């Protein structure tokens, strides 16, 4: 837990390249999450207060700004008194860029990053509509005009022509936070990321135009993934505290996302029919008879013999 109004909290966001006004927005976000969490389960309700939300959710999300090879580069501050030429370059570089946060839940890591990168358009995706209602309300409260939400599943965003036109190969950055096993997640988002062929302008030498996945994960990573990860960075090393987070940030290029997806074993399904996981066919047992309910009526078969009335051998007594 970190008090966002303490010198420690302010120093942490400053070390990530964020301005005082951006820090204030992050602190306000933590308060809004606590407020909404009383009505909708956005994050764990155990020990849910402003300090916990700021330290456990907001800071690790904002820490992505300092991950090497982060596709959006350094944060951009729009403070009026900031005349840094580097900020102007950052804003110009990110103008028109798009990011998608898949499985955003309570708005993480999408909302903190939308605060850090006001010139980038963020689409926050989740299959739970009531969570997106809260997320959009928090974005509006914070004045984040660069945020919109999408209710649905990522793997279905490009199923129809309109979806492909709006989302197919459009995103420079895809975000996720422990949503699913990484190979499955790559399968879901592979069609959203901008490929090198789609990003190249002119002679085809612009390698920086290719989109990338940045995934927050804890625990072990599949062997098929580790060889394709461009960066694997513990978030605690960025925040300067070994207890700050037990998660890591993985950076994977769009091309490698496609390769991981191809080896994932996942298959495409018809829209609305599930998540693409292969289902095993059940086997019927021909020897198993249908069990009859207690008291079930059945007709007596002819070979059951004569009815047993209890007086077949009765002899009338004669005086």
Image (cartoon, helix red, strand yellow):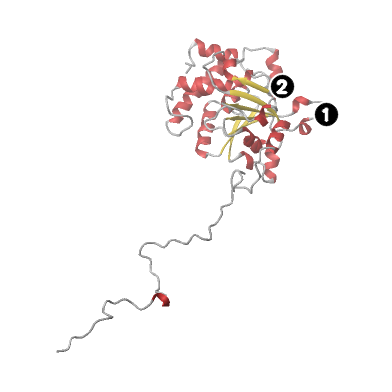
Which of marks 1 and 2 precedes in the sequence?
Answer: 2
| Residue at x-position 51% and y-position 35% | 131
Q: Classify 282 as above or below 145.
A: below
- Across and down, in percent, residue 30 comes to 49, 23
Q: Classify 118 as above or below 284.
A: above
Residue occupied by mark 1: 204
Count of numbered marks: 2
- State yes or no: discs 2 and 1 in contact (Cβ < 8 Å): no
- Across and down, in percent, residue 5 comes to 48, 14
In this rendering, position of residue 195 left or right of residue 152: right
* Residue 204 appearing in the image: yes
Residue at the extreme right: 203
Given residues 273 and 135, the one toward you in this image is 273
Given residues 47 and 78, the one toward you in this image is 47
Q: Classify 307 as above or below 39.
A: below
In this rendering, position of residue 171 left or right of residue 143: right
Of tags 2 and 1, which is closer to the observer? 1
Give residue 112's quadrant in the image.
Answer: top right
Q: Which mark is residue 37?
A: none
Given residues 37 and 91, the one toward you in this image is 37
Residue occupied by mark 2: 92
Given residues 275 and 169, the one toward you in this image is 275
Give the structural element (helix, strand or loop) at label 1: loop
- Across and down, in percent, residue 308 comes to 31, 76
Q: How far apart are the two marked residues, 2 and 1, measured between alpha carbons?
A: 21 Å
* Residue 28 appearing in the image: no
| Residue at x-position 53% and y-position 35% | 132
Count residues near mark 1 (Cα–Cα under 10 Å), then give few for <14, some for 14-19, many for 20+.
few
Count residues near mark 2 (Cα–Cα under 10 Å), then give few for <14, some for 14-19, many for 20+.
few
- Across and down, in percent, residue 292 comes to 41, 63
Identify the image quadrant of the C terminus. bottom left
């Amino acid at each position: 837990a970190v008090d966002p109004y303490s010198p420690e909290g302010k120093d942490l966001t400053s070390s990530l390249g964020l301005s005082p006004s951006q820090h204030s927005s992050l602190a306000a976000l933590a308060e809004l999450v606590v407020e909404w969490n009383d009505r909708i389960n956005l994050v764990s309700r155990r020990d849910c207060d402003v300090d916990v939300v700021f330290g456990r959710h907001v800071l690790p999300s904002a820490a992505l700004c300092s991950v090497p090879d982060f596709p959006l580069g350094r944060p951009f501050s729009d403070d009026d008194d900031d005349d840094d030429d580097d900020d102007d370059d950052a804003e110009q570089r990110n103008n028109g860029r798009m990011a998608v946060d898949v499985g955003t839940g309570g708005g993480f890591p999408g909302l903190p990053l939308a605060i850090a990168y006001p010139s980038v358009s963020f689409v926050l995706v989740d299959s739970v509509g009531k969570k997106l209602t809260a997320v959009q309300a928090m974005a509006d409260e914070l004045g984040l005009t660069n945020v919109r939400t999408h209710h649905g599943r990522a793997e279905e965003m490009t199923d129809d022509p309109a979806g492909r036109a709006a989302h197919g190969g459009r995103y420079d950055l895809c975000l996720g936070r422990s949503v699913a096993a990484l190979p499955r997640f790559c399968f879901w988002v592979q069609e959203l990321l901008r490929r090198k062929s789609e990003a190249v302008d002119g002679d085809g030498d612009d390698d920086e135009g290719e989109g990338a996945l940045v995934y927050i994960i804890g625990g072990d990573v599949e062997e098929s993934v580790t060889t394709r990860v461009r960066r694997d960075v513990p978030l605690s090393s960025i925040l300067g505290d070994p207890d700050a987070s037990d998660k890591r940030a993985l950076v994977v290029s769009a091309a490698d996302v496609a390769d991981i997806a191809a080896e994932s074993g996942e298959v495409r399904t018809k829209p609305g029919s599930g998540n693409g996981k292969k289902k095993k066919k059940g086997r019927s047992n021909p020897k198993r008879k249908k069990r009859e309910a207690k008291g079930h009526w059945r007709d007596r078969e002819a070979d059951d013999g004569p009815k047993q009335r209890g007086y077949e051998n009765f002899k009338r007594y004669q005086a």
